Image (spheres, rainbow, N blue to C red):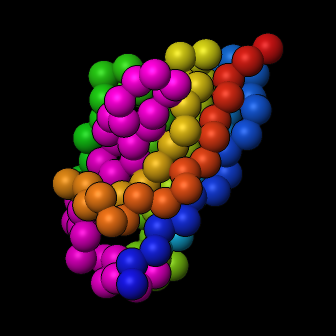
């Protein structure tokens, strides 16, 4: 079955950087459009960035210019490079296909931006 495992989260100071990883298994990863999503407490889960199977990218306005989504199809892995993070980036981050399939949600990785 499809399994998506997020890693790389943690506590980071405002202005700092983190790189999240999403390891995929049980799917032909290179064929899928993929996305990073985040959910802050009390809020709904929202798309942050997405990347097509061909490598085209799109970003939520609030992260454009600070976050970079990428993929390595040879490693079945997707990344989110987060630079110049802000307190409002604090959330649990999840990867999924785009559009997302409910059955594919993993445990996520927590990112906390605080001084």
Q: What is the count of numbered marks?
A: 0
Q: Which residues are magenta?
A: 25-54
10 magenta-colored: no
User: Is the residue 16 above or below the residue 111 in the image?
Assistant: above
Q: Can residue 55 be seen in the rendering of this structure?
A: no
Q: Residue at x 31, y 84 (%)?
A: 28
Q: Can residue 87 be seen in the rendering of this structure?
A: yes
Res. 39 image quadrant: top left
Classify residue 6 as left or right of residue 56: right
Q: Residue at x 64, y 35 (%)?
A: 111
User: Is the residue 87 above or below the residue 32 in the image?
Assistant: above
45 magenta-colored: yes
Q: Residue at x 26, y 61 (%)?
A: 101
> Residue 51: image x %, image y %?
29, 54
Classify residue 24 as left or right of residue 6: left
Res. 65 image quadrant: top left
Q: Residue furthest right?
A: 115
> Residue 60: image x %, image y %?
31, 29
Classify residue 43 as left or right of residue 113: left
Q: Residue at x 79, y 14 (%)?
A: 115
Res. 114 image quadrant: top right
User: Is the residue 11 above or below the residue 30 in the image?
Assistant: above
> Residue 9: image x %, image y %?
67, 44
> Residue 54: image x %, image y %?
22, 66
Q: Which quarter of the rendering shows the N terminus?
A: bottom left
Foreground residue among 81 and 108: 108
Foreground residue among 66 and 24: 24
């Amino acid at each position: 079955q499809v399994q998506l495992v997020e890693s790389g989260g943690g506590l980071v100071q405002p202005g700092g950087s983190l790189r999240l990883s999403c390891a995929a298994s049980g799917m032909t990863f290179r064929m899928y459009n993929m996305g990073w999503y985040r959910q802050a407490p009390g809020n709904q889960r929202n798309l942050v960035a997405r990347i097509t199977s061909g490598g085209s990218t799109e970003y939520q306005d609030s992260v454009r210019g600070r976050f970079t989504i990428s993929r390595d199809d040879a490693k079945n892995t997707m990344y989110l490079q987060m630079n110049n993070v802000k307190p409002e980036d604090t959330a649990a981050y999840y990867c999924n296909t785009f559009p997302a399939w409910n059955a594919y949600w993993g445990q996520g990785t927590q990112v906390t931006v605080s001084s």
